[in-house]
Image (cartoon, rainbow, N blue to C red):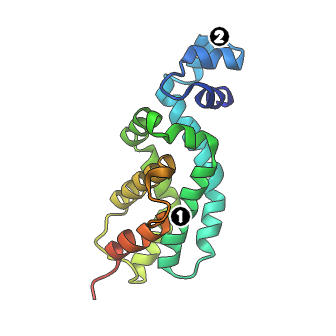
Amino acid sequence: MSAAEECFLAYGVQRTTMDDIAKRAGVSRPTVYRYFADRDALIIEVVSRRSRAFSGQAREFIDSRTTFADKLVDGLTFLIDGGRKDPILQALLRPENLGAASGVLTSSNVAQNLTYEIWEPILSAAQAAGEMRPDVDLHELCALMADVEMIMVGREGLFDPDGPTARDLIGDFLLPALAPAG
């Protein structure tokens, strides 16, 4: 996996082949295929490993917030900032690589499932406490949150530097959509 990460950084996701990874790892191509069925499986494993390594810090940060609003807005912002600082995730989610990486992550529900692992207890608690609409499907919400994270991590320059930040957009649009009626 380390060899794959190095190749993704050096060549980009689209141009990295299993041969490149095998050469970098100093093993044969069949050896790489023994562990990973294809490049997509390798991408999934790299993202899962890096995300899970960061998820403990994210949970700790989110749990340090007292209100649901702060948990959601500050937590998503923390995850986006963390993804932007991770050179491998940044490489995977750059616009030129986004099609290859996000397609794999979305079709396999990996991004949604990783997001669900972090957010389900927080979202369920918010629903139980009446801080969030009870009719929101948590799996669908986590899919949306994962998409928002992927877009905002991969497209840091997407927004006008003098315009709203990721934090502003989450607070202004996502948070109100989850608020209970009345």
The structure residue drawn at horizontal position 64% and vertical position 30%, both measured from the top left corner, is 1
Is residue 47 rendered to the left or right of residue 6? left
Counting residues from the start of the chain, the first of labels 1 and 2 encountered is 2
Viewer-side residue, 79 vs 106: 79
Viewer-side residue, 107 vs 90: 90
Label 1 packing within 10 angstroms: few (<14), some (14-19), many (20+): many
Local secondary structure at mark 1: helix
Q: Is 149 above or below relative to 59?
A: above
The structure residue drawn at horizontal position 68% and vertical position 31%, both measured from the top left corner, is 2
Q: Which mark is residue 77?
A: 1
Task: Kindly identify the amino acid type of the residue bearing the numbered disc 2.
Answer: Ser
The quadrant of the picture occupied by the C terminus is bottom left
Residue carrying label 2: 28
The answer to whether residue 9 of the structure is visible from this angle is yes
Residue furthest to the bottom in view is: 182
Is residue 83 rendered to the left or right of residue 107? right
Viewer-side residue, 10 vs 182: 10
The structure residue drawn at horizontal position 50% and vertical position 25%, both measured from the top left corner, is 39
